[in-house]
Image: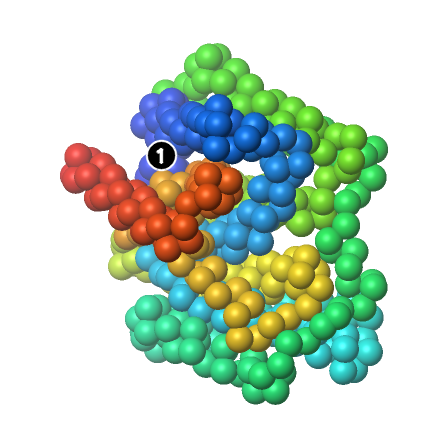
Amino acid sequence: MTIKLERSVEQNRLGAKPTRLDLKAWVMAGVLVVMWATLALLPATRGVFLSQGNIATLLVQSSVLLVISVGMTMVVLVRGIDLSVGAGVALTGVVAALAQIKLGLPAPVAIAMAIGAGAAIGAIHGLWIGWLGIPAFMVTLAGFKAYRGISLVLADAKGLAPMHDDFSVLATNVPPAATWIFVLAALAGGVALTLRDATRRKTFGLEPTTTTVVIARIGGQVLLAALILVVFGTRGVPVPVIVAGAVALWGVFVTRRTRFGRHLYAIGGNPEAARLSGIDVKRTTLIVYILLGVLTAIASMLLAARVNGVTPGSQGAGLELDAVTAVVIGGTSITGGRGSVAGTVLGTLVFATLANGMNHLGINSNWQLICTGAILLLAVLIDVLSKGRRS
């Protein structure tokens, strides 16, 4: 029965036709290209949107959100949610800042302590949600309040700054030579996995991937690598972008090519059927929330390094809603069981482009919130309608 379930999940993940998921990704990529072209041509942006400096800024600014959104994608896949990641960013940031500023510990130790705190937060959520059966909304809403309060208590309601010099490494650029090596290695890995994915379709009895589709997927990866090299090839890629890219690649691998990833889709599709098939739903739920807690701590370290400190009352505020927005825009169903990390990457870039573009256009921040809310609602509507058509 387990084999049949995994085969069904794999078919749902890969799609009945080899172009199905590619179409979603290419549509999202097309939307992103249209947005960039429009913003580049509008006189109000003064021709700076597509400048090397602005694209670099956009990618750096979206790095923190992307790291969290990868973990949020996994949580949403199992029909969960986490409203506490913004407060978690503040709490783990305070832990690292206290370790550096008050205790004088080196950056690696401070970062390890923050990641441990993030894992503990995730474990608490996983135990309450998986073992006690408390709704994820209520558990993480409690964390949304509690973790912000703990942050303020630990920091005595004061900002903690500056971080030590060794911590600032997280906000620097790697040398151009290392940038080329990293990008080309990632491209080689992506091409290899694309070819492997085409082979796996035959294993699960699905329609073979056409040469056109394979070429399109590899072409998209080449274009992405080219964009990164054009923007960062001469100046070196920022560490936050490298970390975000590595987390995204890890997320794609875990969700698409591991048994744990298949279990996420199975639980999201039907938790009871997944349990009856032998999947440990409670354990998987615990692990997925721990992973999100760890990624929240990593994002917190990137943010603390960028701003060179931690403000417990406002650090990470609103990130939980931004992450959910990016995940849903990227095509992950809010009801679980469907979606991809690749879609989340594109959704994060679309979300970051909206914010960056509206700033260049001089749109009032209040209207920016309205636009963001409208886009989130539209993305959910599209998901509901597409689910209705499949039913």
Task: Pick the quarter of the image with the C terminus.
Answer: top left
Task: Using the rendered image of the protein, determine whether residue 256 is visible from the camera's viewpoint.
Answer: no
Which of the two residues, 62 or 292, is positioned nearer the viewer here?
A: 62
Q: Residues within 10 Å of mark 1 (few under 14, many from 20)?
A: some
- Give the percent coordinates (x, y) of residue 87: 50, 71
Q: Which residue is mark 1?
A: 11
Applied colour scheme:
rainbow
Q: Residue 217: where, in percent of width, then height?
A: 51, 23
Taking 92 as reference, is 68 left or right?
A: left
Q: Residue at x 25, y 39 (%)?
A: 382
Pinpoint residue 239: horizontal percent, then vertical percent. 72, 48
Q: Quadrant of residue 272?
A: bottom left
Residue 293 sits in which quadrant?
Answer: bottom right
- Residue that appears at 38% across and 37% down: 13
Is 51 in front, or is 299?
A: 51
Q: 157 or 390: nearer the eye?
A: 157
Residue under the image location 61 percent in, 22 percent down: 222
Image position, residue 166 (x, y; %): 83, 63
Q: Amino acid at mark 1?
A: Gln
| 24 to 242, vertically: above or below | above
Q: Looking at this view, is 206 or 292 the one in front?
A: 292
Residue 315 vs residue 109: left or right?
left
For numbered disc 1, what is the local secondary structure? helix
Q: How many marks?
A: 1
Furthest residue in direction top, as rendered: 211
- Residue 162 in sight from this viewpoint: yes
Residue drawn at (37%, 55%), measured in percent from left and top? 366
Residue 97 appears in which quarter of the rendering? Answer: bottom right
Is residue 144 positioned above or below 366 on the image?
below
Q: In this rendering, would 100 be left or right of 266? A: right
